[in-house]
Amino acid sequence: MTGVSSVSWPPPKPETLRAMAREASVDQLMREAAVLRDAGHGRVVTYSRKVFIPLTKLCRDTCRYCTFAEAPRNGAAPYLTPEEVIAIARAGEAAGCKEALFTLGDKPEMRWSAARDELTRLGYKSTIHYLAAMCRLVLEETRLLPHANPGVMSQDEVELLRMVTASQGLMLESTSQRLLLKGGAHQGSPDKDPAERLRCIEAAGKCATPFTSGILIGIGETEEERIDALLALRDLHHRYGHIQEIIVQNFRAKPRTAMAQAPEPSEEELLRGIALARIAFGPEMAIQAPPNLSPGKLERLLAAGLNDWGGVSPVTVDHVNPEAPWPNIDELSRLTAKAGKVLVERTAIHPSHVQDAKTWLDPRVLPRVLAKVDSDGLARTDEWTVGSHAALPTLPTCSDSHLSPNDDMSSVLSKLAKGEAPDERDLVELFKARGADFQRILVAADTLRRATVGDVVTYVVNRNINYTNICQYRCGFCAFAKGRRAAALRGPAYDLSQEEIARRVREAWERGATEVCMQGGIHPSYTGRTYLEILNTAKKAVPQIHVHAFSPLEVKQGASTLGFSVEAFLTRLRDAGLGSLPGTAAEILDDEVRRVLCPDKLSADEWVEIVSTAHSVGLKSTSTIMFGHVDRPVHWARHLLRIRALAQATGGITEFVPLPFVHHEAPIALRGAARFGPTFREAILMHAVARIALHPYVRNIQASWVKLGPDGARLALAAGVNDLGGVLMNESISRAAGSTHGQEMPVSALETLILNSSREPRQRTTLYGAAPECQVERSWHAPPLIEVQATA
């Protein structure tokens, strides 16, 4: 067999692909295709939960196999009305659909006076213009993402639809001109001219429109002509990068059509078509075959290299193939799992193009897409967001799936269990876990937690003191920071007096605190002396209190304003009584993300250098990650590897705290330029992967009850977590971003949460020592907080 490399895939030359088709058996092609598919998509097989909206069934073409197109009928409206469109869309939305697929005939007004008259009555100059209006209606009135299949379009028409759709599509079907001749499948169908269809697909590329295309097998073409069509599509994709999916669809003979007696393609022809499409396009392309057209054969289709089932509707029939019912989604999931894959929902735009959404989506559509996707560009499938009171989604268990353990994931877990260092690919593999694989990672993390720190769950009685929310930076994720004259959003701008800081420290101690955690905005008037004064105020108020204060960015500001080196300033802070540093301002330690999220803040290297310097002068620190915005699993992996290397080098990190992004009031999310925080699966998975990745250099993994809520924090305890942070007393930063969880978790509530998880609660100090008994006693009898006083 003339083959291509499955490890480092080069696009096979046309003559190589043709030779493979001539020489290879179907089984050989399928094996080659499956290896390529697994290299690009792993175990994930996608589908889109969609509702079909047949805007019009009038068409100027007369394809000899089509039952979708109809002639005008007396009393029948040529087009769906806006009310009918929105009713179908809302029914789909209620059924959990993410996509509204508009199907319609080609340019009906060029053949039918009924279409022309109706468009005139409606006030639109063409079917495409009416389609654009209906896509806009669905986009504005529902949470569905429109995908349009209107036939051949001009570049202007593609651009018009791009403003109101997430993606578009046009099946090439075939490049055979023979099919246009008398007796051919496309007789009397000017819009099926391959040259016209290729011009339309190229126009979509020029407009940077995510596009779906493909071939129709069994309408009179030869395998050589199928390869011609695949290569023509590949050439366009190589030029523009816009094709997100190739459909390999099998012809189905339908009654009352001119091809009712035509032979349907064999199973082998379909399998060869799928395999050749995969080999032609390589690992990354989405290759689809409609599941309703091949009942009983789905495992074989998967074995041929596909990774997508296309649109499956729980609401509407397949209007193009109404005789072929959709498979039940649960049954589709079971059959996919039986073939060793996991079924995952996507949106109308494939993950390949979501990851560079600013390039591929109109600014009016982009926010709608980002609100619906996770870090892999796949669909969010529940209503939970960070800091909300929405019900927690049900997490999969190992018994929920027919899927055997993922060999690649098992290999990574085995490697890390032996104490070998992870690499970037290892961690990305873990972060992509779905279904039962997800639960297996949680079990592995919790087993490691038990072996490392036992069944004790610790927490600290502390108070957050955010002494100012005035900040000269404008980080995209931050709703806490304000300018001096900022409009009130969750409170006005403020700068606490030293008297108020001292009062809060004393009150915290009296309520059982052993720590005050102090951070603020980067106030333009602050200098290193300001930070020293804040520290002195706290230590003078309560000499015994542990001051956990000053982010690495504040340290940099303080040092530079005094003309000190970072080391010299940290030494001054240490000698003045600073106990430890919060490892905040880390966000994502990858400058690709930081350039978008916080371009004027510390670079990743600067953050690591400052924290490393703190460790070198005897100050320990926590470490954090703030995730779920513009980042992806590869960035999370890089972040964890930097934290691991730092902890291994210095031994100075006390804990790792995942901080899920709260999107509700965050500027970057309000601009529609970020996702809506991590999914619950991602939030829990981050804790588990951190436990595994940072072992043995970071012993403590903390869950933030402020971000996850008490119920979410309880579930995180089964994912490698052994610490629940602090009672906080006052929490300002997450609340400013829109978190609805309380500002204080009393020790009784924290301990009840821990006990209900069959774990042992224990108060600790900041550095994980035992809390003094006198403070423990005070914490259990803490009086109500006095209302805080802010100084404008």
Image (cartoon, grey):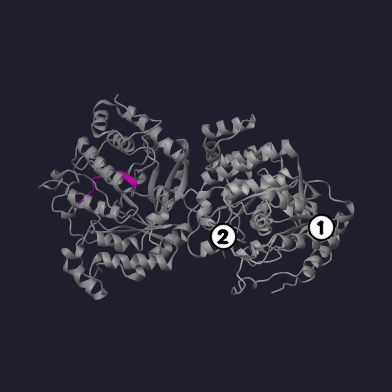
Residue type at the position of mark 2? Phe
Earlier sequence position, callout 1 versus callout 2? 2
Q: How many labels were placed on the picture?
A: 2
| Residue beneath the point at 58% across and 48% down | 604
Quarter the N terminus occupies: top left
Residue lying furthest right: 774
Q: Which residues are magenta?
A: 244-257
Left-right relation of 749 to 251: right
Residue lying furthest left: 182
Q: Residues within 10 Å of mark 1 (few under 14, many from 20)?
A: many
SS label for mark 1: loop
Mark 1 and mark 2: span between their CA atoms? 30 Å
Left-right relation of 224 to 543: left
Residue lying furthest front: 563
Report the residue marked by disc 1. Answer: 513
Which disc is residue 253 wearing? none
Report the residue marked by disc 2. Answer: 477
